[in-house]
Image (tube, rainbow, N blue to C red):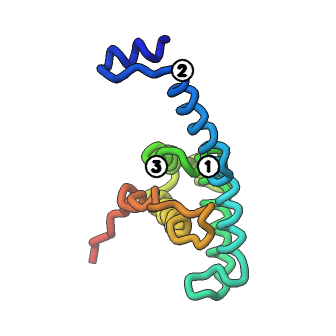
Amino acid sequence: EAINKKREAEGLSLLTDENAFDGWSNFETENAKPKNRLTFNEVIDACLLVKTGKYGAAGGGEMQEGTKDDWKRLVGCYLKEWIGSRRLTDDKFYLTDLVFNGISQHVNRQRGKSFGKPWSPRSKWACAVKVSEFGNWLEENPNVDYRLPANPFKTLPKKFKVKKNTES
């Protein structure tokens, strides 16, 4: 009854009990599909398994250890922290905002003189690039369960663009 009052106030047609039940049933059926239950934790794990494996580099070879470490730290640790519990079907703008805020507010966790200080602009940009590469993997993935129609993180590197030193 409360829903129909809201619908009527918005100039929409009223729902019958059958219409409401069918709508709810369709919604729950769609949410029950395995693809719609996947979290980013699961997909990030699958990505890292490929990327840090023997054939994870762009040309089909093996990545260098430093690059593997970047993937594990930036995507496997930080990105998981920011959106790991979110679902693949969540709103892409919401996901991008979560990641943007995570990068913007991140502080250095490694011991040393920069411990606890905000990331440098170059570190923020590097993380944004790696997250965008993960988004490319999502967009181009041959496994349809992990595939997204578009990279939700494509614009992140532009938001953290580093000014080049122009001194001669």
Q: Secondary structure at mark 2?
A: helix
Give whichever of 63, 120 is nearer the camera. Answer: 63
Estimate the x, y position of residue 88 in percent, counting from the top left. 58, 51
Q: Could you tell which of marks 1 and 2 lies nearer the N-terminus?
A: 2
Front label number (3 vs 1):
1
Instruction: Answer yes or no: is residue 126 visible.
Output: no
**Residue, disc 3:** 92
Q: Amino acid at mark 1?
A: Asn
Query: How far is disc 3 from disc 2 in space, using C-alphas?
Result: 33 Å
**Residue, disc 1:** 36
Estimate the x, y position of residue 165 in percent, counting from the top left. 32, 69
Quadrant of residue 7 in the image?
top left
Front label number (3 vs 2):
2
Q: Residue at x 60, y 44 (%)?
A: 30
Q: Amino acid at mark 3?
A: Lys
Instruction: Answer yes or no: is residue 157 visible.
Output: yes
Estimate the x, y position of residue 147 in percent, counting from the top left. 56, 63
Query: How far is disc 3 from disc 1 in space, using C-alphas?
Result: 14 Å
- 101 to the left or right of 7: right
Q: Residue at x 57, y 48 (%)?
A: 107
**Residue, disc 2:** 17
Q: Residue at x 51, y 63 (%)?
A: 135
Q: Could you tell which of marks 3 and 1 lies nearer the N-terminus?
A: 1
Q: Amino acid at mark 2?
A: Asp
Give whichever of 138, 32 is nearer the camera. Answer: 32
Mark 2 Cα shell of 10 Å, populated few (<14), some (14-19), many (≥20): few
- 2 to the left or right of 47: left
